[in-house]
């Protein structure tokens, strides 16, 4: 399924939360639309000395609780609708975690796998210069996302700083540590998935020791989630990337699989594992399923095939509303993306605070603060879920949308 249907799903979720909250119709109308959507034509000179033209997007959803915050993704399927939906989810994610941010998202429609490092640098710097007027540490703070990384953020920060005339490390997050990045940022999203899964396991009475896990996606989130949960004593039985997946009932060592992927370009044909498709991975026999790839992976068509007791969403929007209902009726404990993967934006907030105050926290400080924040937020959502007799996504949306709506009511509209 393509990402073209992501925005209607995000709007359906907003409608459901608004109805549950009995939200004022005017506030609901405000939250349906982003405050600003920026489209730019990113032109660069390719290594072949031809001109390349790429569509760049930055959507700023709503900033009533603070500056916009959200990642930048490079992918051939980036669309305005997709980025708008992701910016909306970022608004709720920040509100759920009580972070002083509004949601944003950005992207460039390109194929980074077919571009050189120099081409990616030119693309990043040109894009940053084109949206420069709408960025800033108190206006909009980008971060890495799909197929972008700390190097991308270093280029963005440097470009922004060059245009300002002085160094502004707090203008982006997810940077390398040597130029103001935070300890623990690379594993932050995976850690929040692990913390949430650990607490959910207590609720469903599942012992994590030797619990079987299938992970869709072996990028930054998927790889780090596999490593963290492997170290927690879980047994990783299936992992996939964009080319397909592998299954091994005896367990997979994520470090060895990562080395195999670096050598061969994919996870396929690893050791004694059986090759499987991404669709088969979602239906694999496991206790915990971690979708950590793209949107719209668990749908109304395959949700009934999910065998896991817990689904922890490492990716943004991997489950459709129809699939949500099916999983809830099946008794699957789903930890929604806006809770499960909120570790990334939480440690981004820590990085921003460190940059603003020109301090640097230790890894233990960062991880302890992250764990406390994630566990606290998890049980806020869990308690509301029990009170409303709803699934975890609905209660998370109610919490996030409700806080943003309250902030709008409190501040009022000007003029």
Image (spheres, helix red, strand yellow):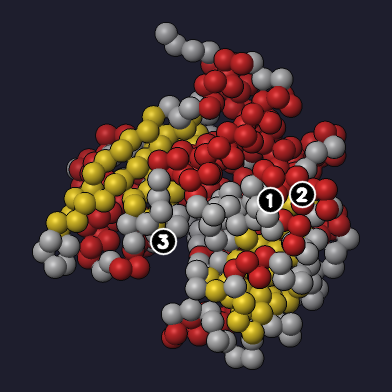
Residue position marked by numbered label 3 in the rendering: 147
Contact? badges 1 and 3 (CB < 8 Å): no
Contact? badges 1 and 2 (CB < 8 Å): yes
Residue position marked by numbered label 1 in the rendering: 300
* Residue 170 x, y percent position in the rendering: 38, 45
- Identity of the residue drawn at 27% across and 34% down: 133
Looking at marks 1 and 3 on the same chain, the residue that comes earlier in the sequence is marked by: 3
Q: Residue furthest front?
A: 301
Q: In this view, does 152 lie above or below 106?
A: below
* Residue 112 x, y percent position in the rendering: 34, 63
Q: Considering depth in this image, is 261 or 167 the residue closer to the camera?
A: 261
Q: Residues within 10 Å of mark 1 (few under 14, many from 20)?
A: some
Q: Residue furthest bottom?
A: 272
Q: How crowded is mark 2: few (under 14 residues within 10 Å), some or many (20 or more)?
A: some
Q: Can residue 353 be seen in this view?
A: no
Q: Considering depth in this image, is 215 or 352 the residue closer to the camera?
A: 215
Res 66 label: none
Res 326 label: 2
Query: Mark 1 and mark 2: span between their CA atoms?
Result: 7 Å
Q: Is residue 350 above or below residue 286?
A: above
Looking at marks 1 and 2 on the same chain, the residue that comes earlier in the sequence is marked by: 1
Q: Quadrant of the N terminus?
A: bottom right
Looking at marks 3 and 2 on the same chain, the residue that comes earlier in the sequence is marked by: 3
Q: Residue furthest left?
A: 49
State which quadrant residue 301 falls in.
bottom right
- Identity of the residue drawn at 40% across and 45% down: 79
């Amino acid at each position: 399924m393509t990402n073209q249907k992501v925005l209607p799903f995000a709007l359906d979720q907003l409608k459901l939360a608004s109805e549950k909250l009995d939200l004022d119709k005017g506030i609901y109308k405000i939250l349906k639309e982003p405050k600003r959507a920026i489209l730019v034509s990113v032109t660069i000179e390719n290594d072949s000395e031809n001109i390349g033209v790429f569509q760049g997007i930055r959507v700023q959803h709503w900033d009533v609780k603070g500056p916009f915050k959200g990642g930048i993704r490079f992918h051939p399927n980036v669309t305005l609708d997709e980025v708008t939906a992701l910016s909306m989810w970022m608004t709720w994610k920040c509100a759920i975690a009580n972070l002083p941010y509004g949601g944003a998202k950005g992207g460039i429609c390109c194929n980074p796998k077919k571009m050189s490092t120099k081409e990616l640098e030119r693309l990043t710097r040109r894009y940053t210069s084109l949206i420069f007027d709408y960025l800033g540490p108190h206006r909009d703070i980008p971060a890495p996302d799909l197929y972008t990384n700390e190097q991308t953020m270093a280029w963005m920060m440097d470009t922004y700083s060059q245009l300002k005339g002085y160094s502004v490390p707090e203008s982006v997050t997810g940077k390398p540590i040597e130029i103001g990045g935070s300890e623990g940022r690379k594993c932050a999203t995976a850690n929040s998935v692990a913390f949430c899964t650990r607490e959910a396991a207590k609720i469903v009475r599942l012992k994590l020791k030797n619990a079987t896990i299938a992970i869709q996606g072996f990028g930054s989130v998927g790889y780090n989630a596999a490593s963290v949960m492997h170290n927690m004593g879980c047994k990783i039985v299936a992992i996939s990337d964009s080319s397909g997946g592998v299954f091994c009932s005896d367990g997979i060592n994520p470090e060895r699989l990562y080395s195999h992927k670096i050598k061969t370009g994919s996870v396929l044909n690893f050791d004694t594992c059986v090759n499987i498709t991404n669709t088969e991975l979602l239906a694999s026999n496991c206790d915990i399923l971690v979708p950590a790839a793209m949107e719209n992976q668990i749908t109304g068509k395959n949700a009934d095939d999910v065998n896991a007791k817990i689904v922890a969403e490492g990716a943004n929007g991997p489950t459709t509303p129809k699939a949500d209902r099916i999983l809830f009726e099946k008794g699957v404990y789903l930890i929604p993306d806006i809770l499960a993967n909120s570790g990334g934006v939480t440690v981004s907030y820590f990085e921003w605070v460190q940059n603003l105050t020109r301090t640097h926290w230790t890894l233990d400080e960062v991880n302890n603060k992250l764990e406390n924040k994630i566990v606290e937020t998890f049980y806020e959502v869990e308690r509301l879920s029990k009170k409303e007799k709803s699934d975890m996504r609905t209660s998370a949306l109610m919490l996030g949308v409700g806080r943003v709506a309250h902030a709008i009511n409190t501040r009022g509209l000007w003029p």
